[in-house]
Amino acid sequence: MSHCGTIEAIAASHCGTQLATGSVDKTIIVWHAHTGEARLQLVGHTRKVCSLGFSPDGEMLVSGSDDAVRVWDARSGAAVRVLVMDDSSGRAVAWSPDGRRVAVAGKGGSVHILAAGAWELERSLAGSAQVEALAFSPDSMTLAAGGWSQSVHLWCVASGAERLVLRGHRGGAPEEPGGCKCPRGAREAGCLRPGHRSFVLAVCFSPDGGAVASCCFRGECRVWHARTGALRRVLSGARAAAFARGPPRCAERCLAFAMGQHARLGAGSRTGALPADVVQAVLESD
């Protein structure tokens, strides 16, 4: 059991025992993270699988595609629900750590927040550019969204208010929250907080929620302070289709990532495809 096309989505369960991959071949495979054994193959999407997210208990899996958002039983592989949303792109999905909500990327930059279980729309967040990555903070109170804007937007889940934009120099206006303090017209090379130079592919929070890591198509990984928007670290060599981080209670605190048709799981700094400093920067907390 394996994919016959490029992996476009990857997710690690919160306990660190399961890994799910989605591919352009329209299938999803659930793997045993420790042995690498393929447990289940989920078939149902009619377009490539763009995004995946486990429920906190690891028993459910949500997947996004251009055709629909689907909910699966991760233990048996049974289809639980098909969510056909007119404004859903399926490019990104995320399940909140408290298990109460699922976020789904819409078209044109919007993000929809659904009540898990009832699968009813709670609210929609308006954006300006296509969203490619979503992640909830560990306390489920903040949602991070990254995409074609080359920035990361932080939203308050309860109110729907945009709290911060992590955009660095490339955002332009100094008065914008999360932007740099350079005068207008200043050269980017002299800025201490340059933003991403390409669209954001992946985002995740540190275990304590104090930092946000984002990776873009050009292979740049940036680690931001989640409260102030300050840029903490800039790393290179992190170009991957997607990554997923396990929680602090997981003994191996895993970072999963996909490149081509292969998925890999690294523990701490032990990984064969991403530089150790990139892995450690994503896993570290304040």
Image (spheres, helix red, strand yellow):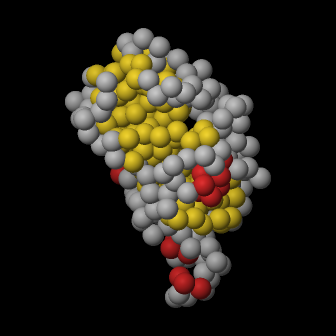
- Tell me, yes or no, if residue 241 can be seen here: yes
| Location of residue 245 with respect to 285 vertically, above or below | above
Q: Residue shown at 42%/64% (left/top)?
A: 218
Residue 56 in which image quadrant: top right
Question: Most extreme residue toward the right, as rendered?
Answer: 286
Q: Left or right: 55 with respect to 97?
A: left
Q: Residue shown at 49%/20% (left/top)?
A: 60
Question: Most extreme residue toward the left, as rendered?
Answer: 46
Camera-side residue: 47 or 250? Answer: 250
| Location of residue 33 with respect to 66 vertically, above or below | above
Q: Position of residue 138 (x, y in %)?
A: 67, 38
Q: Left or right: 202 with respect to 255?
A: left
Q: Left or right: 176 with respect to 242?
A: right
Q: Residue shown at 46%/28% (left/top)?
A: 36
Camera-side residue: 199 or 174? Answer: 199
Q: Position of residue 157 (x, y in %)?
A: 61, 40
Numbered-mark total: 0
Residue 207 in which image quadrant: top right
- Tell me, yes or no, if residue 102 can be seen here: no
Camera-side residue: 184 or 159? Answer: 184
| Location of residue 79 with respect to 276 vertically, above or below | above
Q: Position of residue 24 (x, y in %)?
A: 27, 39
Residue 2 in which image quadrant: top left
Q: Quadrant of the N terminus?
A: top left
Q: Position of residue 90 (x, y in %)?
A: 36, 38
